[in-house]
């Protein structure tokens, strides 16, 4: 066992119980955890993009992401005017307008200025729009009263299928992997590993059908498992695409053995919206 693997395992053994405990607490505890990770994530993005602590865009980006997070926090979102002022759409529009006007006055070539602005908007949308869905999965917006399933159980399901699926994908990839899934973005990922990740997620779905989700139709649970696995694994590639474009391995070293907040929760950011909207869909139908 390598030193890095020992560190990864030790950190996971300590943090996973804490994360799950917070998930079951929900409310302010959960929002606080999501907010901390989101603010670390946007900081990592901005620093890697070349925006230092002295940069206007660094603090402007953090402010906008913070307001986008607040727009989803129940005590804020329950107030119409606060919801309007802090909404994700408003935040993105304001950030786009202000940053575009300022960047357009720069002295670099128009191609560089446009690319810089596009990447800046991408990062704020990536973090500010996707992180809140982790909180919303345990919030009132997606609570399925008829199913009597707690927000903590939903997050346990999501984290479990992603963690087990990631391990299964790695195992299947090393065992059977031959065909590259994304050769330029992540050369080590294979189609066989991708399928293995889905199988691991489905196994967690089957377990949850008998353990926590007895009141929910089994096919909905399995569709959620497959969908979250697909979205999560491809979401991992999205973050890798960004890192490859900068030539970096990790977004930061803040989590020993795991990289940064963007590295650790890249799959989660794409899987959480899928789970959220599928739950809303089956509630309506």
Image (tube, rainbow, N blue to C red):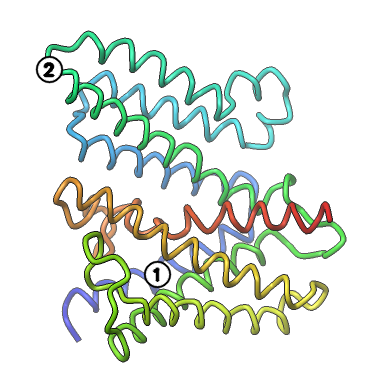
| Res 235 → quadrant | bottom left
How far across and down, in percent of the image, does residue 195 sit? 44, 79
Q: Name the residue under label 2.
A: 108
Give the total of numbered labels.
Answer: 2
Residue 215 falls left or right of residue 114: right
Q: Position of residue 227 (x, y in %)?
A: 57, 66
Residue at the image position 48 percent from the left and 69 percent from the top: 162
Alpha carbon separation for disc pair 2 and 1: 47 Å
Residue visible at 52% across and 59% down?
271
Residue 158 placement, left or right of 208: left
* Crowd class of label 2 (few under 14; some 14 to 19; many from 20; radius 10 Å): few
Which residue position is annotated with label 1?
14
Label whose residue precedes the other's in the sequence (2 or 1): 1
Quick one: which residue is furthest to the right in this view?
146
Q: In this view, does 65 lie to the left or right of 7?
A: right
Q: Nearer the viewer, mark 2 or mark 1?
A: 2
Local secondary structure at mark 2: loop
Instruction: Identify which residue is drawn at 26% across, 53% down.
Output: 254
């Amino acid at each position: 066992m390598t030193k890095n693997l020992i560190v990864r395992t030790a950190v996971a053994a300590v943090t996973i119980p804490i994360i799950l405990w917070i998930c079951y607490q929900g409310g302010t505890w959960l929002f606080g955890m999501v907010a901390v990770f989101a603010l670390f994530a946007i900081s990592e993005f901005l620093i890697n993009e070349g925006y230092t602590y002295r940069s206007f865009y660094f603090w402007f980006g953090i402010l906008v992401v913070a307001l986008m997070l607040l727009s989803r926090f129940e005590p804020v979102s329950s107030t119409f005017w606060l919801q309007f002022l802090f909404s994700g759409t408003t935040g993105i529009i304001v950030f786009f307008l202000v940053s575009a006007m300022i960047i357009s006055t720069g002295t670099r070539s128009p191609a560089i200025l446009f690319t810089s602005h596009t990447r800046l908007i991408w990062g704020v949308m990536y973090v500010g729009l996707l992180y809140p869905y982790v909180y919303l999965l345990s919030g009132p917006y997606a609570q399925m009263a008829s199913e009597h399933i707690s927000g903590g159980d939903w997050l346990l399901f999501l984290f479990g299928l992603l963690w087990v699926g990631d391990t299964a994908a790695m195992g299947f990839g090393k065992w059977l992997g031959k065909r590259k899934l994304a050769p330029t973005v992540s050369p080590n990922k294979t189609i066989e590993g991708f399928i293995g990740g889905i199988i691991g997620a489905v196994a967690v779905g089957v377990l949850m059908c008998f353990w926590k989700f007895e009141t929910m139709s089994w096919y909905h649970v399995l569709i959620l498992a497959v969908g979250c696995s697909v979205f999560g694994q491809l979401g991992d590639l999205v973050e890798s695409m960004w890192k490859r474009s900068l030539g970096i391995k990790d977004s930061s070293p803040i989590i020993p053995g795991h990289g940064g907040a963007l590295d650790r929760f890249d799959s989660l950011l794409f899987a959480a919206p899928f789970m959220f909207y599928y739950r809303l869909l089956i509630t309506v139908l």
